[in-house]
Image (tube, rainbow, N blue to C red):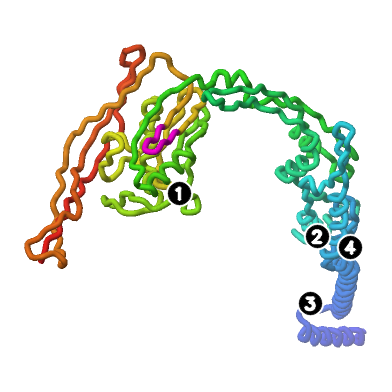
Amino acid sequence: MDEPHELRVKHSKDEVAATEMYGHNHDPIKSRRTGKNRIKKKKIFFIFSGIVLLILLSVGIPVLYYTWDHHTIVEGVKIAGVNVSNMTQTQAKSAVEQEITRIKSQTLKLNADQQTPDIKLEDLGLSVSADQALQDAYDISRKGSLYHKITSKMNAAKGVSFNFTSKWDDQKMTDSLNSRLGSYNKPAVDASFDITPQNTMNIKGEHNGLVYDLEALKTQIKALDIFHPSSELKVNFKDQLPQVTAAQLESQKITGLLATYTTHFDPSQAERSENVRLAAKSLDMAVIKPGDILSFNNIVGERTVEGGYKDAYIIVDGKFVPGLAGGICQVSSTLYNTGLLANLPVVQRSNHDLAITYVPLGQDATVAYPDLDLKFQNNTGAYLLIRTKISSNTLTIEMYGKVSPGQEVQISNTTESVIQPEEQHVVDQTLKHGASVVKQQGQPGYLVKSVRTVQVDGKVVSTEPLKQSVYKAMPKIVAIGP
């Protein structure tokens, strides 16, 4: 009966020892099981991690390869029908440029009254570019997130197309069409006129024309499908009306003499007389359209040695000095008075620095090419004709146009002030002591106001102040001996 008790006691000691070693409630069997579980979990973790890694590798490597930039355009891309899949940018550009060349080289027949001239689309001003399409094609699967790159590449594989950009050069088209079709035109002929020996207008009638409809044809061309254009276009013709009719010319007809004015010159001054003659000849038979500007410089042109003009006295800085084309201001001054008497509005006029004698003070007009000019506005509603007549010592300018019956024009001048010349003395070593010689006769300066008065049937209808004239005084120069 005692042995079982001892055994129980021994067991109790072992348990005590185990308790001291592992803890108060240690179960050896349970501990062994816990260790095995931990090892099992680690195995499961490593197995799972390996599986995940294998999955990632099996998926990731193809994805990386799928989205890897090979510097080529993705599969399924076309530009204007040209397959550029898997091409580099250079290869794709070369491929589409062949198509561009084909498009621009296409020929169009222009059916113009049984004539069919050929013309290339390129010659009509067509320009084609693939630059944007090439860039858009190359950008597929190269922008955005990884997901976006994958989806855009997958969508492109189903087929995606880009097109060229094209435009027409309107001016080149116009020039090309005119060069090929211009000979088929029968342009309208404007009414015209000749000047008769009696200084009237002999009017010739107008004729209607027939010309191809440029704008309608350009509209047809611009609406073409440049990839597959029509092989032929019908060229339509339309009536062309003249811009000037006989009826218009009749209403603008020269009916008679508006005004005339004559000045005198010294024929012994041969160079000056020749200059007057040349300028007068340039003015003769000049015609000014209704509403246009009558410009002395535009009609006479530049005065040059090649044109025959010679040196004669001109006014420069208040002095008479030799200069090319001296004397033509007599022609411009004569024209100025003729225009005033014809009641034309003055657009530009300048008086001389010094008083001159061939026209009254206030009625001269100096000119110098190209800026210093004499200009009138033709506001008569009709054509103006200038005629010049020159004798041995006179210049006459006539102006013809649409006469206003009963009209009379008068020019009046008022000298507001006179500036007396000063006397200047200069020493002349060649003269004897006390001797004196007048080297330059002085002349006064003036301030002159001018007025143009227009009467119709004896009644004043307008009074117009003209631009005032200011003339400098020219000093008297006396040389004296030392």
Crowding near the residue tagged with mark 4, few <14, some 14–19, many ≥20 C-alpha atoms within 10 Å: some
> Magenta span covers which residues?
389-396
* Residue pointed to by mark 2: 138
* Residue pointed to by mark 3: 25
Which residue type does callout 1 highlight?
A: Arg
Mark nearer the N terminus (3 vs 1): 3
Mark nearer the N terminus (3 vs 4): 3
Nearer the camera: disc 3 or disc 1: 1
Crowding near the residue tagged with mark 1, few <14, some 14–19, many ≥20 C-alpha atoms within 10 Å: many
Q: Is the magenta stretch mostly helix, strand or loop?
A: strand
Q: Which structural element holds mark 2? A: helix
Q: How far apart are marks 1 and 4 (CA)?
A: 74 Å
Nearer the camera: disc 3 or disc 2: 2
Q: Which residue is drawn at 86% across and 64% down?
A: 91
Which residue type does callout 3 highlight?
A: Asn
Within the image, what quadrant is residue 246 found in? top right
Mark nearer the N terminus (1 vs 2): 2
Within the image, what quadrant is residue 138 found in? bottom right
Q: How far apart are marks 3 and 2 (CA)?
A: 74 Å
Q: How far apart are marks 3 and 4 (CA)?
A: 74 Å
Q: Residue at x 45, y 38 (%)?
A: 295
> 170 left or right of 351?
right
> 358 left or right of 310?
left
Q: Which percent across, then down, holds residue 323?
A: 36, 53
Q: Which percent across, then down, holds residue 239?
A: 75, 25
Q: Which structural element holds mark 4? A: loop
* Residue pointed to by mark 1: 303
In the rendered image, residue 338 lying in the magenta stretch gets the answer no
Can residue 48 be seen from the camera position used here? no
* Residue pointed to by mark 4: 86
